[in-house]
Amino acid sequence: MTDALTRETSANLLDLAGLGDLEALALIGLSKNAGKTTILNHIITAWHETGQTRPLALTSIGRDGETEDIVSGRAKPRIYIPTGTLIASAEGALQRSDALLEILELSNVRTAFGEVILCRALSDGYVELAGPSVSDEIEVITRLIRKHEPESLFIIDGALSRRSQAGSGGIEQIILAVSVGTSLVPDDLAEKTAHAVNLLQTPLIDEQKLQLLSAAIAENPQARGILLSKGNERTHYKAVQLPSLVGFGQEISKEIKKNTFLLFLGGAVTDHVVTELLKEAEFANLTLVVEDGTRLFLKPETMRRLKHRHVLLGTLNALNVCLVCLNPTHPNGQTLESTPFLVALRQKITTIPVIDLGPANR
Amino acid sequence: MQSSVMITSELLQQVGLPAVLEATHCRTPQGSRQKNAARVYGIDNKADLEQELEAVDNLVILIRKKHPHLVETTTQLARLRELRGTFSRLEHGTLLDDTEFFELKGALAIFSRLSKVVAVTEAAGVSFKDTSKAAKMLDPAGKKNPAFHIYSDYSTTLEDIRSRKSVLEKQISKSKGADRKTLLTRRAMVIDEEDKEEDRIRRELGIKLAESLPQMQHNAEACGLLDFRLAKAELAVRWNGCRPVLVSKTQPAILTYITHPLIATHLEKQGQEFTPISIEIRRGTTVLSGANMGGKSVALKTIFLGLLMAQLGYFPVCESLQTPLYDFFAFETSQDGDLYRGLSSFGLEAIKIRDHHRRSKTQNGLIIMDEPCRGTNPGEATAIVNALSKSYSASDCSLVIATHYPITPLEGIRFYQIRGIRPEALAQLPPLPEEPTAAEVDKHKRSVGISGLAQPEMKQDLTRVRRIQNMMDYRLEEIDGSHAVPSGAIKIAELLGVDEELLREMKTAWQEEQWQN
């Protein structure tokens, strides 16, 4: 809905999210059809209208920008890019794009839709983004983009988290998309969004722990779990190799000792995983570390139980949510009045701008 | 005709050829393909093999000199992608997509750059054909950048369509609502025209490029050949290999101070050294004898791998090597009986003996047998091994046989033995050496393999075994045929602490045996 409130904020989108000086930005949705592509289209328009000189460089984790959502079959907004934009997308997706694209580089990154190719748009036009399927390969794409357009704003539709690697020290910026599909009750949606923002912004662990853990990860890049424990004079670590975290909680919890002060888990940390860990009495008074905030899938109740045990959460890479965007259209097609949702969201989330950008002009 | 290699894949693995191929680092898919299809040059391809060795030798010189052209060569090779699919579609007139045109454009730039590194291409004995006509087609405006799209320069029609589209796009960027929708619909119609014209151009471009297909294919293969030869040369430098000299088939193979590069690396990791060996292999039979633990199997593998590498156009790791070209290579050991398929090991051996013998009547081969008839009763085994030695002694083949059985000297049979441990040195050793020191045990702790898993007592035994190995002189020496069968097994048993009572029995039985003979 483009009411007065949203129109005003739409023009200030770049300022609100602080995009003017950013190098990279990730768009993350709280649910499917949360409106990430709409946000992307808004950013592109705002970028173009404000006469930014730096080009945009776009890719996605997995596939996006198709005319139809593969899951729901509902029409999805396409991405309309201006001349000069760089895109990294799979061959198959490029064939369905209508902008005139100049091929700059073949990435050797393969997806189900073919190799990811880096192109520059020589005309305006619609594109479909289907980038690397795993976030590790984003590194390859980032390198290629920086080679051709070192100054560009690189936007990734999807999480840009790097697996098991301590961050470069920089904080990754995120725009979070939320839809009324998550809850039709404004206060409830606000509660859930605030919780998600909280998890995404889980802070970086302190420098000393970061150094110890980074060294242990470097020696055991495949380990699912790493435990740091205080010894007599020095810190010891134990690496646990597991096929996944789910179903192997006990394998990790049995390694937790009284002097364990840090537990790193690689991969998604869910309520189920934490419940398994909580069965172990020694799982207390320590820091539970994940790669970044996108790896945490925990209900408020689980967070309370962790707090009760004095278990703190920490990350290897800090994320910063710079903007929350509301999509008032329910996945069933019904569009609701956004004002009550915005009011509720802004009450709960006071430090981050919350806006409804309205439908993109596409 | 190419030479054939008759060896089971497990044994080939043990001999080390797959590891040699793996250590040959090709940079292009074309080079890797040539490596995987590597042929053993036969007598009919002697000139080709000479050319191959010459090329590798020339490249070795350039690498040692750190020739500046090598950097450009390796950079360009590393960028080359697989082109077979694109070539095949071009050949069959299938419409190429823009990615394939981009790939071709990239490849043509690589060909052009490589054709300029004359020092390297001449050394490697490869030549590039002129493909500038094709390159120009993919860069109609002569911009010399690697990017590609269907350029407006290809047709005035396309140029016109795109300028109309561009006008519309400018209008679209300033419009909103219904106007925008109308403009987008109009744009979609122009895009339809653009798509059709682009496809027409792609088709035309494909037909024109197909005219240069033979030159492009030639160049892609040249890249592969250059890559493979360069990889062989880099390996030769890394391993300090030596160019083999090819001699006529009546002349012997002479291997001087040859090393097995992989076993040597393995030993190095354990802080030990490989003893290079020297041997002359003439037509006829060469018998290799030596005490247990003397390294007969390693010597045979070293000889086989060295001669095979030479005939594959590789540089064996030695001081010098001359070899005739063998029509076939065979390596047999009675250890590789296929228990799983329920075949008896002697059954398999008999089949191999039969086949090689038949083949030897018309071809000259290098046949290596590591302790044939090991599991057969000694009387018959001695008879079989003697018959084999005698039969091959008069043939055009070279049979190298390691055996413990006594072989009757004959013309055409030469004898080598591994020096081993001098009997005096052996006799002077105390029967059961004192417990290995903690430092000695500790020294072997870090070594890989079985010892890493062994229990403490077993570790002590392994240390003792190593101590004996350290006394071994692994060099080969030619001896006359009337030598005694090498002994020393009982002494080794003694050194390893076999109980006195059992040892006494062994010694008595051995004395009786010698007395009877």
Image (spheres, coloured by chain):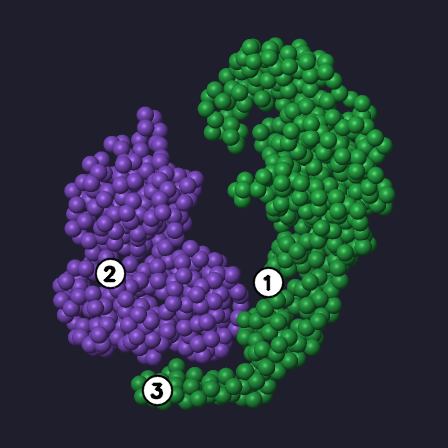
Q: In the image, B466: left or right of B195?
A: right
**Dot 1 amino acid type:** Arg
Q: In the image, B156: left or right of B474?
A: left
Residues behind callouts 3 and 2 on a single chain: no
Point 20% across, 36% down: residue: A281
Q: Give residue B49's position: percent from left, percent from top.
A: 78, 52
Of residues B427 and B438, the one nearer the viewer is B427
* Residue bearing mark 2: A352
Point 38% across, 67% down: residue: A63
Q: Give residue B372's position: percent from left, percent from top.
A: 67, 34
Within-10-Å neighbours for mark 2: few <14, some 14–19, many 20+ = some
Point 28% across, 72% down: residue: A72
Q: CA distance from mark 3 to mark 1?
A: 43 Å
Q: Residue under mark 3: which chain is it in? A: B
**Dot 3 amino acid type:** Lys
- Dot label at residue B314: none
Chain given the colour purple? A
Mark 1 touches mark 2? (CB < 8 Å): no
Element marked by disc 1: loop
**Apparent colour of chain B:** green
The answer, for residue B458, to whether it is visible in the render is yes
Element marked by disc 3: helix
Question: Which quadrant does the C terminus of chain B fall into?
Answer: top right
Point 42% across, 55% down: residue: A136
Looking at the rendered image, the disc whose residue lies closer to the viewer, 3 or 2, is: 3
* Residue bearing mark 1: B81
